[in-house]
Image (tube, helix red, strand yellow):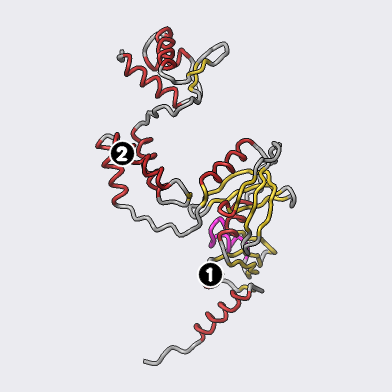
Amino acid sequence: MLETSARLLKLLSLLQTRPSWTGAELAGRLQVSPRTVRYDIDKLRGLGYPVHAVPGAAGGYRLGAGAKLPPLLLDDEEAVAVAVGLRTAAGGGVEGIQDSSLRALAKLEQVLPSRLRHRVNALHDHTVSLAWEGPTVAADTLVTVAAACRDRHRLRFGYRTHDGSEQVRDVEPYRLVHTGRRWYLIAWDVARQDWRTFRVDRVTPRVPHGPRFVPRAEPPPEVVPRGVDTALSRHRAKVTVAAPASVVLAKVPDSIQVESVDEHTCVVHAGGDTPLRLALHILMLDADFTVDGPPELLEMLSVLSSRCAAPAPSG
């Protein structure tokens, strides 16, 4: 049988892994009597841990939220995952958490067993992270938007569009999407009566929030990838391609929207950060195509055509 202090730590660890436990389940895990479990629960309560009794025929216990953060007990894999996550957050795109991530990482690495510290340091020492060049998102904005999604509250916010103009939007928030480069909000736009995708770094939440809403059916599968792909790309084009949709779909990522026109033709919604990249994406379809714009794309395609048609320099 475990000593009392070790048993309390084991009990606390169990309570942190599931929403609730019956007294019999805890007694079986700890190999003690239900009476000892009740004694240990009272000990944890005396130490300030908010352990609540769960009503019902089976009864049980759950660990609630308290006035202060209790120590977290992590197994080896959880500790490594948290350390890696903190290192990533310290260099990522969420504004205001870099310093706090480093402080939390320093505390964690101080108490990591040497075998785990070596694993974490090996991963860090042999990983090269590219400098973050994208827009950052305020941490409190992410928290506010995520809470609105969770609580199903209408969300009002100022929104800076691609051309720099300011709008006020009223939405029913559905999900946050993180692409690794940017954060997006998928939401039902109340005024436009349609699903929309918003870049969170352009969102300024307004208070108070709107009323609660009844969740709608999930958006069509194409809404999220299409919206995110479009928002990622500064230059976009609608390209008519002389090839079946099934053939084109096999050549492009899942995030690219392809619409079938007939058995020989489809329309591709292409995007790129520069006119050159957009042109190259279209050329990589390896099929005849027609495109009407934008002007910078047409100009780049003309430049590429001229280069390809130019005679090779003589030796």
- The disc at residue 29 is none
Q: Amino acid at mark 2?
A: Glu
Can residue 85 be seen? no
Q: Are marks 1 and 2 in contact (CB under 8 Å)?
A: no
Q: Which of 214 and 252 lies nearest the eye of the viewer?
A: 214
Coordinates of residue 64 in the picture (x, y in percent): 50, 23
- Look at the picture and state if 292 lies above or below 153: below
Q: Secondary structure at mark 1?
A: loop
> According to the image, label 1 marks what residue?
274
Query: Which residue is found at the position 37% from the left and 46% from the top?
Result: 87
Lower position in the chain sequence, tag 1 or tag 2: 2
Coordinates of residue 104 in the picture (x, y in percent): 37, 39
Quadrant for the N terminus, please.
top left
Q: Amino acid at mark 1?
A: Thr
Left/right placement of residue 75 relative to residue 243 reads left
- Look at the picture and state if 298 lies above or below 157: below
Residue 188 colored in magenta in the image:
no
In the picture as drawn, the residue positioned furthest to the left comes out as 114
Query: Which residue is found at the position 65% from the left and 65% from the top?
Result: 267
Query: Which secondary structure dominates the residues rendered in magenta?
Result: loop
Q: Residues within 10 Å of mark 2 (few under 14, many from 20)?
A: some
- Look at the picture and state if 53 lies above or below 118: above
Left/right placement of residue 263 relative to residue 123 reads right
Q: Secondary structure at mark 2?
A: helix
Q: Residues within 10 Å of mark 1 (few under 14, many from 20)?
A: some
Residue 253 colored in magenta in the image:
yes
Which mark lies nearer to you, 1 or 2?
A: 2
Coordinates of residue 145 in the picture (x, y in percent): 59, 43
Q: Which of 259 and 64 lies nearest the eye of the viewer?
A: 64
Please provide the residue range marked out in magenta.
Answer: 244-256
